[in-house]
């Protein structure tokens, strides 16, 4: 399912059980807000969080896209979450640990809203292309904490062990023209590390990054750009192109480079 809106560069998770975070998010410059009902919420606060999420989306988040992450298919909360999301005015439902086409299709039908499928288990990665192709799926989101755990990657290791999964997620998303959102970066105070990870995520082809703290928004927004230098080069390339293979400065360009430059400028206009 191709989504009319541009993909978010910055998608901020927050616990739906945290009213201060909800209030704060209304003043933050994130492209998307994801109210979490799953891992960020204690078991004894699930019902209260669900009601708070529905009320928060009804109150609105201004120009920001708004999503609710429900509890997984195996969870006792899943059915109540589906009912709440279906009746809510959120733009997207985020579904954790999606592993099958049947589950993605059933949830999309139940909620009647576009679905962002989290790919965060080995089975999910292996089925990612089929999940992305389900009508109603608007994007794939990498769940890197769960992926690390389910792949057996030691705590504290870099992203090397995730690369095949991350590339599979991007490939699957692109094959169905849906969004590809990179996973979270847990180190709350490491802006330099976050910037490097965002830039690498962009190099892999991701549209944007999932985030967990307000401080991460400007870093990710800058990395997923485009920056002024990129825009200037894109404009110059479009102006110089006359068709077919030709020289642009010290490199060859063809029609697809002009299309890429136009997409970059479109992305900037947002
Ligand atoms: C990680 C945190 C628990 C840290 O909280 P805290 O120590 O309270 O942060 P600060 O004191 O620095 O907060 C300063 C102010 O900013 C607000 N705040 C903090 N985080 C957010 C947020 N995410 N959105 C909006 N506002 C936020 C605080 O309320 C403070 O405001 P104020 O008091 O008014 O000044 C916390 O950051 C947090 O809960 N983050 C989100 C956690 C979350 O949602 N996790 C679920 C998704 S991650 C995941 O599981 C992905 C995937 O499934 C996977 O497997 O990888
Ligand atoms: Mg997860």
Image (cartoon, helix red, strand yellow):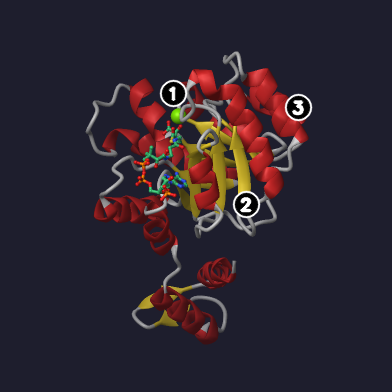
Q: Which image quarter has ligand 2?
A: top left
Q: Badge 1, how many Cα within 10 Å: few under 14, some, many 20+?
A: some
Residue at horizontal 56%, vertical 26%? 98
Q: Earlier in the sequence, mark 3 or mark 2?
A: 2
Q: Is residue 182 left or right of residue 32?
A: left
Question: How far apart in space, not on screen, are marks 3 and 2 (Cα)?
Answer: 21 Å
Residue projecting furthest to the front: 20
Residue receiving disc 2: 65
**Quarter location, residue 186:** top left
Residue 153 seen in this snapshot: yes
Position in image of residue 58 (x %, y %): 71, 44
Question: How far apart in space, not on screen, are marks 1 and 3 (Cα)?
Answer: 25 Å
Residue receiving disc 3: 110
The nearer-to-camera label among 1 and 3 is 3
Residue at horizontal 52%, vertical 25%? 97
Residue receiving disc 1: 122
Residue at horizontal 62%, vertical 36%? 53
Number of numbered tags placed on the structure image:
3
Question: How far apart in space, not on screen, are marks 1 and 2 (Cα)?
Answer: 29 Å
Q: Quadrant location of the N terminus?
A: top right
Residue 70 seen in this snapshot: no
Q: Is residue 105 left or right of residue 254?
A: right
**Quarter location, residue 221:** bottom left
Q: Earlier in the sequence, mark 1 or mark 2?
A: 2
Q: Is residue 29 left or right of residue 84?
A: left
The answer to whether the residues at label 1 and label 2 have Cβ atoms under 8 Å apart is no
Q: Badge 2, how many Cα within 10 Å: few under 14, some, many 20+?
A: many
């Amino acid at each position: 399912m191709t989504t009319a809106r541009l993909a978010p560069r910055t998608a901020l998770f927050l616990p739906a059980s945290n009213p201060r975070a909800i209030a704060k998010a209304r003043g933050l410059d994130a492209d998307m807000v994801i109210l979490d009902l799953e891992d960020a919420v204690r078991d004894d606060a699930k019902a209260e969080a669900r009601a708070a999420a529905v009320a928060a989306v009804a109150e609105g988040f201004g120009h920001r896209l708004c999503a609710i992450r429900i509890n997984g298919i195996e969870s006792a909360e899943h059915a109540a979450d589906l009912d709440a999301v279906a009746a809510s005015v959120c733009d997207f439902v985020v579904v954790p640990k999606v592993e099958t086409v049947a589950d993605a299709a059933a949830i999309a039908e139940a909620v009647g809203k576009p679905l962002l499928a989290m790919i965060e288990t080995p089975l999910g990665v292996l089925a990612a292309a089929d999940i992305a192709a389900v009508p109603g799926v608007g994007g794939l989101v990498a769940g890197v904490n769960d992926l690390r755990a389910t792949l057996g990657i030691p705590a504290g290791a870099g992203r090397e062990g995730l690369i095949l999964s991350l590339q599979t997620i991007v490939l699957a998303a692109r094959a169905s023209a849906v969004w590809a959102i990179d996973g979270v970066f847990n180190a709350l105070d490491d802006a330099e590390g976050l910037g490097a990870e965002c830039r690498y995520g962009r190099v892999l082809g991701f549209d944007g990054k999932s985030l967990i703290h307000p401080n991460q928004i400007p870093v990710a927004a800058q990395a997923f750009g485009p920056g002024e230098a990129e825009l200037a080069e894109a404009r110059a390339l479009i102006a110089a192109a006359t068709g077919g293979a030709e020289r642009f400065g010290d490199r060859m360009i063809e029609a697809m480079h002009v299309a890429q430059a136009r997409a970059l400028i479109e992305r900037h206009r947002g």
